[in-house]
Image (cartoon, rainbow, N blue to C red):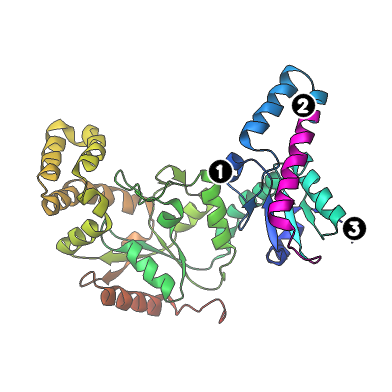
Amino acid sequence: MKYPAVLPFRDILPRLHEFDAIIDVRSPSEFAEDHLPGAINLPVLDDEQRVRVGILYKQTSAFEAKKLGAALVAKNIARHIEDGFLAHPHEWKPLVYCWRGGNRSGAMAHILARIGWPVTQLDGGYKDYRRHVNAELATLPERFDFINVLCGPTGSGKSRLLQVLDKQGAQVIDLERLAAHRGSVLGGLPEAEQPSQKAFESALWQQLRQFDPALPVFIESESKKVGRVRVPDALMDKMRAAACTDVRLATDQRVQLLMQDYEHFVGDPARLNVQLALLTQLHGKEKIAHWQQLATAGQMAELVEELLVQHYDPVYRQSIARNFSRYAQATPLVLPDISEHAFEQAARALCAIVGEPRTASAA
């Protein structure tokens, strides 16, 4: 084969795992928004350089911009080779891509091929990959024969149950983990920024494509948006028509669970009060002031119970039956407490109801 080989993503996907490196040569900000699974960022133009070349192109001429761009690209590729590639053997097989599969990836791929490495360039670049992801997310959910939606009010342990199901070998889509958000006004995670919409969809696509369509898939009853990212319509439609499991946990146990999961708010009342203020339109200034006073006084258990009873539970009751058509026929799953043993037992019971999950190797 003549190198660089220039192939579209549909031809590359079946052997994506065969590449020794997937190299994204776009700028760091482009890479941060989204990238191919497993890619590393080795920009041939950084963000500042890309802006300089773009300004020169618009304000002077394409010729002057190309001269500057070529000089910068050549320097950056040379640095990448010196810093990271010199120890690679002759058989080292990289995949290189940029935004459209044009000049930036073409320059890197050409030089690597001239050195003698069997390099492949993604024809159409990231845009071709993105088109594939969009098309797959519109059709992938329909391939699954059975999706089981875990329902239950806030604090009932749905996310923990998903985590245990995953450990036991079940096929699990944890939308809140993928979105780095717990899905409510208090759902932001202190240790992580939410991904971009494109990165969220890439992670979801990567997970879905590895599932066995003949085996059950477990997912939580999320709304269309988890924080600021949106669940793709095809998956949302499949969820809302799916069989449901109603996860039940006593209120006092839910309070304990939420105080564990939201420890960052329990230890920082001022931060919690900022978020509570966002509920003023729903509950009025007097109620919000009362809740903020409880937070400031450290009466967190009382506050959490009031939030459950007066805010989260009524909202849940209004939305769940309306949005999930089979909720009325949901199978109840009662958790006696929030111990690890209770969740393990519940996960086994659920799998027994819908069919035992198998590991990927067994499938």
Secondary structure beneath dot 1 equals helix
Q: Specify start and end residues of the magenta stretch as a single range.
A: 67-91
Give the spatial CA distance, label 3 vs label 2.
30 Å
Whole-percent x and y of residue 348? 36, 79
Is 58 situated left or right of 241 in this image? right
- The residue type indicated by label 1 comes to Glu
Q: Quadrant of the N terminus?
A: bottom right
| Element class at badge 2 | helix
* Residue 88: in magenta span: yes
Task: Mark 3: give few (<14), some (14-19) or many (20+) Cα within 10 Å.
Answer: few
The majority secondary structure of the magenta stretch comes to helix
Measured in 3D between alpha carbons, the distance from the residue under mark 1 to the one under mark 2, in whole angstroms, is: 25 Å
Query: In the image, residue 354 lies at what x, y percent?
Result: 42, 75
Determine the secondary structure under disc 3.
loop
Q: Report the disc number at residue 2.
A: 3
Q: Name the residue under label 1.
A: 33
> Which percent across, then down, holds residue 186?
29, 46
Residue at the extreme bottom: 362
State the mark number for residue 92. Answer: none
Establish if 286 lies above or below 90: above
Q: Evaluate if marks 3 and 2 touch, with contact meaning CB atoms under 8 Å apart.
A: no
Give the Cα distance between marks 3 and 1: 33 Å
For marks 3 and 2 on the same chain, the one whose residue lies earlier in the sequence: 3
User: Is tag 3's residue or tag 1's residue first in the polypeptide sequence?
Assistant: 3
Q: What residue type is labelled 2?
A: Ala
Tag shown at residue 65: 2
Horizontal arrangement in the rendering, residue 324 relative to residue 55 (left or right): left
Give left or right: position of 345 versus 17.
Answer: left
Looking at the rendered structure, the kind of residue marked 3 is Lys
Mark 1 vs mark 2: which is more N-terminal?
1
Asked if the magenta segment contains residue 59, the reply would be: no
